[in-house]
Amino acid sequence: MISIPKKGTPERDRLIREHLECVQSMAGVAGFSVLKCATPGDTTVISGGVHEDPLLKRVLLRMRGASTKGKLVVICTRLDAEWRIGRLSGIRGVPPVFATDEVYTSEQDIQHAIFLMRLDEMPDSDGFPEHYHEGYKRRDDNWPVT
Amino acid sequence: MCAMRLTGYADKFGVHPGDTIKFYVNCDGPAKYQASVVQMINGDTNPRGPGFIEKAVKADCEGVYDGIKQVVYGGSYGFVADAPQLKPDSFTLQCWIWPTTPKTDKRYWKHGAQGLVTKWSGGKGYGLFINTDGCVELRINGETYTNGAPLRDHAWHFIAASFDALTGEVVLHHEPQVVYALDPEIPPVKAVFRGKVEHTGQPLVIAGYVDHVEPGPLGLPSLPQGVIVGGHYNGKLDSPRLCNRALSRFEIEMMKGGAQPGLTERRNAGPTGALSEAIVAAWDFSDGIDTLVAKDAGPYRFNATLVNCPTRALTGYNWAGQTFDWKVAPKEYGAIHFHDDDLDNARWEVSFEWTVPTDIKSRFYAAKLTTPEGDEDYIPFWIVPKIGQEQSKIAVMVPTISYMAYANEHVACNAGGAELFIYRVPIMQQQNMFLAEHREYGGSIYDTHTDGSGICLSSRLRPILSIRPKYDHFLAQAPWQYPADLHLICWLEQMGYEYDVFTDEDATYDGLARLENYNVIITGSHPEHNSGTQLDALHNYTQRGGRLMYMGADAWYWVHSFHPAYDGLGRGVVTEMRRCESGIRTWRADPGEYYHQGTGELGGMWRYRGRYLHSVAGTGMSSEGFDISSYFTRTPESLDPRVSWAFDGITYEENLGNFGLVGGGAAGLELDIVDTMLGSPPHILTVATSAGRHTEAYLLVMEDFGFNQQGLDGTVHPRVRADVTFHETPNGGGCFAFSSIAYCGSLPWNNCDNNISRLTKNVLDRFMQDGPLPAAPKEAFKHRGRADYESPALASST
């Protein structure tokens, strides 16, 4: 399978750079995608990101498909003003908890912060479908379904 | 963390001028709160839009109220009031169970023993339970008897337990219906209990047990009042029986047949006359599936009152897989699925009420609750004119069934962020955080219960934190449903239109009478969930010259019905929907469980009941994606004199709606297209399209293909697009479909000075005129096939 590039590799640096450029171009959009707006904040012309970087797309798919337990989420702590990174418990009725003390003042920038955290937290082979374990027998794989 | 100390709901969604609306408020902490009434105009706080707008309304209920804590008692169960026959010296209890969470994590929100059939409380009485090890347990007073064999989840088990007061013998049977090759045998457990069953005056409970009695105000919302039921059982329960002596295993087998009232030489079969004398109660859940009563066919008629609307019309232990409609084979549908997070009514005490003045405008309103410490909540409602007292030529049909379907959804939390379909990390608002902790507020029809089974019922008699202003939904990272529809309201207000509002309930119950006095009906951005009579009303309206402006997408999709057992509490209290054979489904109904418990009608998509989505307003859902939106451009058909008036002041070349407060464009989230094979009329004109402009997050709906393959996303598939359409209906009527959920988010952009606003205004100005629309040119009348042309809207064919 395709590995998540290790720290210090040029691929990883490229992914980080591409992701950051996409995130920055999305400032002001009432929505978000890892794609680049030709004019910042305007989705009329978009390119790059997951549409043009197959490695970035694969890495993001694996991150997005990770199990609920311990998964990072964004928590809005002040409407249109402050956001923090949280972690899902994976257990119903047990709410997410804050994962860091950092307070973000952009709902887009925090997407990049989580991308960086996931790159650091996830081993390069994280989420390989061939990592068979007993849980695969009853959908306890890493692709959450609703 | 973001604790919400103020929450509330009203007894009605829609209230007529002159009528009274009641508000129920939980104020958990602050000593006082201020209540007022406001008109809601814009709920979106996005700094690129007009910002939050509300208008003060003079109301005599305005004032400062004492803060009183009110709690929600979630979890379904049945109860029977205490009676002498329920206090036998000896007994046998038996039932079939299909447990879904026999064992739970210690951190699970309701971790603990689960009651099956219990007349037990505080160490007194008797009952069948599942203990925390996931094993069946009989309790007699403080003693417990179990077999150490954990119950397999999602499997039928027959359970029975008896106690003989004379000999003291206790027997516990646990017999799985399906035994696999390597399953150890589960022999009956035998023991001796020396003593008497100590009976209490507490009710008998099915799917729970009496946890404690709460005589204070906090106990008022529970049923029976003041009696707090705990130990909620998750799973199906079928055919419980209670007998007043210890039955042999053979007698227990006979007793599976239940009471056979009126046994004669010609009818019924089951326990013999002698054995029947032991019956105290023999519940038959297949009787009265559309009610809130679990009927007892036994001699004493100990009918159980069902609380919090558990799911019925589900297959029982004896379902044969031959009949799929419970009405045809009710005896195979004798199971009730109880959930520890079911909720039909918060049953709070009234905090204040307001008699609506007779001269008030029909609009979106809300009760605004605040405290000096900064707490805030809004309880939205709508003032709806009485029929015959309409105030305007325009009416907005508020998609309240869809609001209920999405009420208090937990998808961001449950589905691991649902990141694979929203294509980013979700943002949880304070409402989501509160609900993640307060499961008792109940989930939405998009969620699964805490046991993983689908939620198919939703009540409006509970605080619904998703029907709120200042609430961005994780799906859109922007307003969705109620706050998104306020974009439309904001536009109507800014443009100076006079308009009335009515709800889905009004259309459902009143039919055409509710619609026919308006020149034009405007929908919300996402009226996805609809009752049959509502669709009938829309059909009758447009066929008789009415005009419909369909302002969104993914509408007319799911079959809904209001549960008739709640009719006494008002209109549309509990709505039901089943996610059947196809469609975008966050859960999927199990085989044999497609028919509604309330009305008995087939659930699922209207498409599979032969009512194509496209037949209602011209277009139907093709795709969805939740990252960012795109825009429209005109097609040659927009130049047709039948419709060119809609583009007055708009050039042919300009991009339509490449701006907006939902995804950044007018074409986004969920998209509708023309399909003359799926109900779009053959004379429909596609006047603008977003073909070829969507991201790979946008995917074709699954009901449009039968084979999984690559190439279903917005960058390549021609059906992943939105089409703006117009068609005439008989008698001078017409439909304009804008076909995108994000569309309304572009209306208020730049102070409503933009081409989406212009297009919408052109259509509304024409549609709101008295009398029939101007006739189409003579040459437009001609015979048309369904597909004898190539649609210019198809980018792939040009």
Image (cartoon, coloured by chain):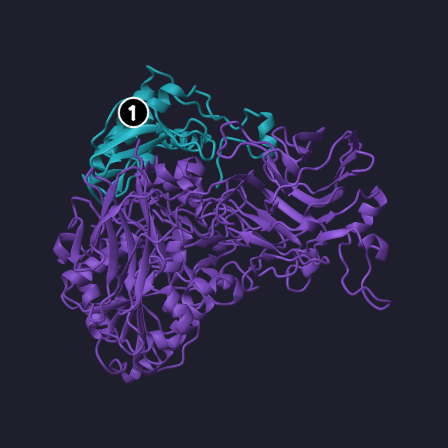
Q: Position of residue B698 (x, y in %)?
A: 37, 47
Name the chain under label 1. A
Along the horizontal axis of the image, is B87 left or right of B270? left
Report whether residue B657 is seen.
no
Residue occupying image coordinates x 35% and y 74%: B514
Residue at far top of view: A8
| Chain represented in cyan | A
Relative vertical location of residue B725 with respect to residue B781 in this rendering, above or below: above
Q: Amino acid at mark 1?
A: Ile
Nearer to the camera, B669 or B681: B669
- The 10 Å Cα crowd at callout 1, few under 14, some 14 to 19, many 20 or more, is some
Q: Secondary structure at mark 1?
A: helix
The part of the image, by quadrant, that contains residue B99 is top right
Report whether residue B384 is seen.
yes
Along the horizontal axis of the image, is B165 left or right of B574? right
* Count of all numbered marks drawn on residues in the image: 1
Nearer to the camera, B139 or B426: B139
The part of the image, by quadrant, that contains residue A103 is top left
Circle 1 residue: A16
Residue occupying image coordinates x 83% and y 52%: B275
Quadrant in the picture for the N terminus of chain B: top left
Along the horizontal axis of the image, is B521 left or right of B76? left
Q: Position of residue B594 (x, y in %)?
A: 58, 57
Q: Position of residue B531 (x, y in %)?
A: 45, 65
Nearer to the camera, B646 or B692: B646
Q: Position of residue B355 (x, y in %)?
A: 26, 64
Residue at far bottom of view: B778
Quadrant in the picture for the C terminus of chain B: bottom left
Relative vertical location of residue B64 with respect to residue B605 in this rendering, above or below: above
Image colour for chain B is purple
